[in-house]
Image (cartoon, rainbow, N blue to C red):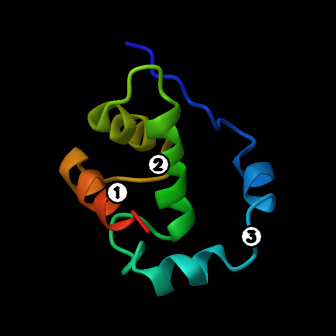
Amino acid sequence: MKLPNPFPEDWDCWVKLLPADLEASARRLGAFQRARALASPLELLRLLLCYVMAPRPSLRATVVLAQLGGWADLSAVALFKRLQRAGP
């Protein structure tokens, strides 16, 4: 099964378009509390965007995509819990 990657090599270009205080805001609002399986709020945002942009969103497919890309390593359940906390 081939998984689509909406942010292959140009992720850094997308990051430049984001607000400068994104990481501080994510921590202040509780969307990102600690670096464990994800190193930064940007990685959480990347996972969220990959999930919502998929033709048929799947938490499992999203984490497999991240693992194959080498930029995140967590379970589908862990991603689900992170996305729940990222609401605000």
Q: What residue type is labelled 1?
A: Leu
Q: How many marks?
A: 3
Quick one: 63 or 29, which is closer to the camera? 29
Q: How crowded is mark 1: few (under 14 residues within 10 Å), some or many (20 or more)?
A: some
**Label 3 sits on residue:** 19
Pointer 1 or 3: first along the chain: 3
Task: Determine whether, in the image, residue 60 is placed left or right of residue 13.
Answer: left
Give how far across and how far down residue 29 sits, in percent.
Answer: 46, 81
> Do the residues bearing badges 1 and 2 touch, measured as CB atoms within 8 Å?
yes
Q: Is residue 25 above or below residue 39?
A: below
Distance Cα–Cα, label 3 vs label 2: 18 Å
Q: Which residue is drawn at 65% across and 35% down?
A: 8
**Label 2 sits on residue:** 47
Q: How crowded is mark 3: few (under 14 residues within 10 Å), some or many (20 or more)?
A: few
Give how far across and how far down residue 72 sits, in percent.
Answer: 42, 53
Give how far across and how far down residue 28 sits, in percent.
Answer: 49, 87
Quick one: 41 or 70, which is closer to the camera? 41
Label drawn at residue 83: 1
Give how far across and how far down residue 55 sits, in percent.
Answer: 47, 20
The quarter of the rendered structure image containing the N terminus is top left
Distance Cα–Cα, label 1 vs label 2: 9 Å
Quick one: 39 or 30, which is closer to the camera? 30
Q: What residue type is labelled 2?
A: Leu
Quick one: 73 or 17, which is closer to the camera? 17
Q: Which residue is drawn at 34% across and 64% down?
A: 37
Q: Is residue 53 above or below residue 77?
A: above
Task: Determine whether, in the image, residue 60 is placed left or right of residue 72.
Answer: left
